[in-house]
Image: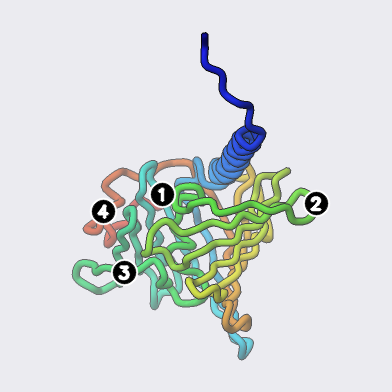
């Protein structure tokens, strides 16, 4: 006679909860990947301006060029003003290399530093997307089509421990991000203010503003001027090539 096992309602409930949790996790991951695909794919070169605003109402601006490869390399270089033009930062996975004009060679840097001061860090300018560098902790409904994703930084070199990302699920774009330290303190808020279509591609970030979490009087506004799909040669993403990044710029 075949053995029979008593029906346990608890088992069914546990199984349903596991299936539900798996489905939610898949939904969160898909949402992050959708954002990354729309905002970061085929944006191999970006020209932009950053304007710093300080509590004393002083303002200064600089122009930049950034580029990504199809692996884990990214670089950014200051184009103007003259005093800092040529300053460059290279990210290769979890490693950061910095070069200042007039220096021989380059030296190690950190993602938490800023290429030109202000609120936007190296990581803010050079990340490849949200899905790769974070573990999903939770997702909660906000208002309208918006949800708030709580994400944990995957590695200690990142400039924050936790990211709270508000997303417009209908458009598949971020609305706001809050970068939190291990103690829960707010280091900065980034507001994604405008998205535009460049070269007929998906809408991409055209303007975002970073606000210092300790002193909101310090703000950095990033405005994109052009996005190009052409990739730089693989050799451009090497520390010894930072001095010659300018020769790769589009006319």
Quarter holding residue 172: top right
- First in sequence, mark 4 or 1: give its number: 1
Q: How is the image coloured?
A: rainbow
Residue receiving disc 2: 144
Quarter holding residue 22: top right
- First in sequence, mark 1 or 3: give its number: 1
Which marked residue is nearer to the observer: mark 1 or mark 3?
A: 3
- 80 vs 61, left or right, is left
Question: What residue is at 55 percent from the left and 62 percent from the top?
Answer: 163
Is residue 229 shown to the viewer in this render? yes
- First in sequence, mark 1 or 2: give its number: 1
Quarter holding residue 7: top right
SS type, badge 3: loop
The outermost residue toward the top is 1
* Dots 4, 3 in contact, CB < 8 A: no
Distance between the alpha carbons at the discs numbered 2 and 3: 41 Å
Question: What residue is at 50 percent from the left and 47 percent from the top?
Answer: 131
């Amino acid at each position: 006679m075949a053995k029979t096992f008593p029906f346990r309602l608890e088992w069914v409930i546990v199984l349903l909860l596991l299936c539900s949790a798996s489905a939610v996790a898949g939904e969160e991951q898909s949402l992050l990947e959708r954002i990354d695909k729309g905002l970061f794919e085929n944006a191999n070169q970006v020209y932009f301006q950053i304007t710093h605003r300080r509590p004393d109402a002083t303002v200064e601006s600089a122009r930049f060029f950034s580029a990504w490869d199809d692996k884990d390399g990214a670089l950014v270089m200051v184009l103007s003003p003259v005093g800092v033009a040529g300053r460059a930062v290279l990210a290769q996975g979890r490693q950061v290399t910095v070069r200042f004009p007039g220096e021989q060679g380059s030296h190690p840097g950190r993602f938490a530093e800023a290429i030109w001061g202000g609120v936007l860090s190296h990581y803010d300018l050079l990340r490849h997307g949200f899905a790769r560098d974070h573990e999903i902790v939770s997702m909660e409904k906000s208002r309208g089509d918006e949800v708030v994703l709580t994400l944990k930084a995957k590695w200690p070199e990142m400039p924050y421990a936790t990211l709270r990302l508000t997303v417009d699920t209908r458009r598949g774009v971020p609305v706001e991000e809050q970068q939190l330290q291990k103690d829960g303190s707010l280091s900065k808020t980034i507001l994604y203010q405008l998205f535009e279509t460049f070269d007929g591609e998906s809408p991409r970030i055209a303007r975002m503003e970073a606000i210092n979490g300790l002193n909101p009087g310090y703000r950095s506004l990033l405005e994109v001027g052009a996005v190009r799909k052409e990739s730089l040669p693989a050799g451009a993403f090497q520390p010894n090539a930072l001095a010659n990044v300018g020769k790769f710029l589009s006319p």
